[in-house]
Amino acid sequence: MESSILIDMLFTVVGGLSIFLLGMNNMSVGMQAVAGNKMRQLISAVTNNHFMALTVGFLVTAIIQSSSVTTVMVVGFVNAQLMTLTQAIGVILGANIGTTITGWILVLKIGKYGLPILGFAGIYFLFSKHERNRYIARMVMGVGMIFFGLELMKNGFKPLRSEPEFLALIHSFSPETIGGLILCVVTGAVITAIIQSSSASVGIVMGMASTGVITFSASVALILGMNIGTTITAFLASLGTSTNAKRTAYAHTFINILGAMIVLPFFSLYMKIIPVIAGIDPNTSILKDGVETFPQIIKGIAIAHTTFNIFAVIIFIPFVNIMSKVLLKIVPDKPFKEQPRLTKLDVRMLETPMMVIEQSRNEILHMGQTIKDILNDLRSIMSDNEDTEKNKNNIFREEENLDNIQKEITTFLMDTISGEIPHDLVQEAHSQLRMADEYESMSDYVTNILKLKLKLQNDHISLLIDDRNNILTLHDKIVFFFNKIHTAILERNPQIMAEVKAEGNAIVHQFREIRAKHLQNISDTKSDPLLSVTYMNMLNSYRRIKDHAENVAEALAGVK
């Protein structure tokens, strides 16, 4: 082959592949932005019902357009203890079917329209002012780029058909022999492991097959190998994770390898069944502009890909629980207890911003629950109950933890919003950043009240009975106030500001009454100055807790 032809072919194929991958990325970003909220609801709907997990895996992968991203995301959820191993296996099985959607997109006979679709969508993207419409245009641009990239790859592969050296090499990839079949599968796995995108690998195979460079049977054998190669991404993502997350990555690998091993002994029969299911003859060719092409072979490849993955799901879905038990044996728990993490935030989610927001929301809810717990501990201490050492230690420990959690959430969200994400997600991220800051401040004031109480104890001074009862009444009102706000966050209910303002004003009124009563008592009776100063500081700290809780409600409601 002449070097100039080789260079032209290489440039065309590489350029087409780059445009194809960029199209996949644009379509994924656009679909995530348009369907992000639905996707968050889907993930939260995962239960131990295998078919629900299967459906979620299919739909999420169809949205993201990448089984690799889905499985990496699942590894992250398992690592964060937000999903069990059994649930994860069900989602992975669904993702294996969802990833075949890309092949079906390529089956659409609009390849020659790829560039016009890209052009019109690009113009709309540039001049549209509405963010949602821009993301829809970006998604359509992605579709156009996928088809245009595929057309470029097809054109790049065409010269290979007239090269005897290449044709001789391709004959060694004939799946009619056991050695050739294994070579095809291994090659498909290696290509996908390098590219780390089964969708791109399938696009390459379809481009080569449609121009007659490789046969239909070789294409299907390569696809089986690509199903194995795509597991490398999840495996790499599992490095450095918890034992359960490693099991999830291994489950993905075992499912795809075992599925291929089950089909390989019956490959010749499989190749006879696929054309019948598709209702086509993949070897049918047409002459267009003096060039022979195989228009039906792409549909045959898509059907072979989907059929194989559906077959694997049917085989494995009844054995999900058994598979979980086997993985527990293969990857046993570590002899030492794994160090628990302060947050369950995972950088593996950064490719799916709406999942980042959902993860950080869970951490915000965890911070809120912690505030509830330490407020309960504080009440026990303020009531002068006996044996409050455990409560005291818990408050100090959790206050320090909340400081670190707030820093982790801030770092995680800042990394997310520094990228290109929809405006509504940016707003939600800002709201969560504000909530995390307010919760951390609340913990500081809870600790401050505790220190004031301990200072009185060390000086052998006790609060007067009336003062103690008044402060406990104020404490209970603030706890009730905070619980209402925490429930609103849990239920995603921003319509609470009017109620919050009214109750907040009532607490301020009560605070002023208690302060006035205390000041009156000071003038009527002689008391220790330290007691009075400390008591007033306690009251002020309680008021600040109320203020920060109200700020949390404002963040939820989007009030600046």
Image: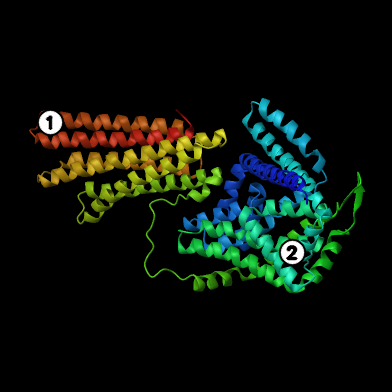
Viewer-closest of 34 and 158:
158
- Residue 430 image position (x, y, % from top left): 46, 35
Comparing 337 with 236, the one in front is: 236
Q: Quadrant of residue 91?
A: bottom right
Q: In which quadrant will I find the C terminus?
A: top left
Asked if 551 appears above or below 363 in the picture, the reply is above
Q: Which residue is mark 1?
A: 522
Residue 520 at what x, y percent from top left? 16, 29
Q: Residues within 10 Å of mark 2 (few under 14, many from 20)?
A: many
Residue that mark 2 sits on: 221
Q: Which element is circle 1 on?
A: helix
In this orientation, does residue 190 appear?
yes
Q: Is residue 169 above or below residue 40?
A: below
Amino acid type at circle 1 is Ile
Q: Residue at x 72, y 47 (%)?
A: 10
Earlier sequence position, callout 1 versus callout 2: 2
**Which amino acid, by three-letter code, is at mark 2?**
Ala
- Taking the view exactly as shown, the residue that stands out farthest to the front is 2
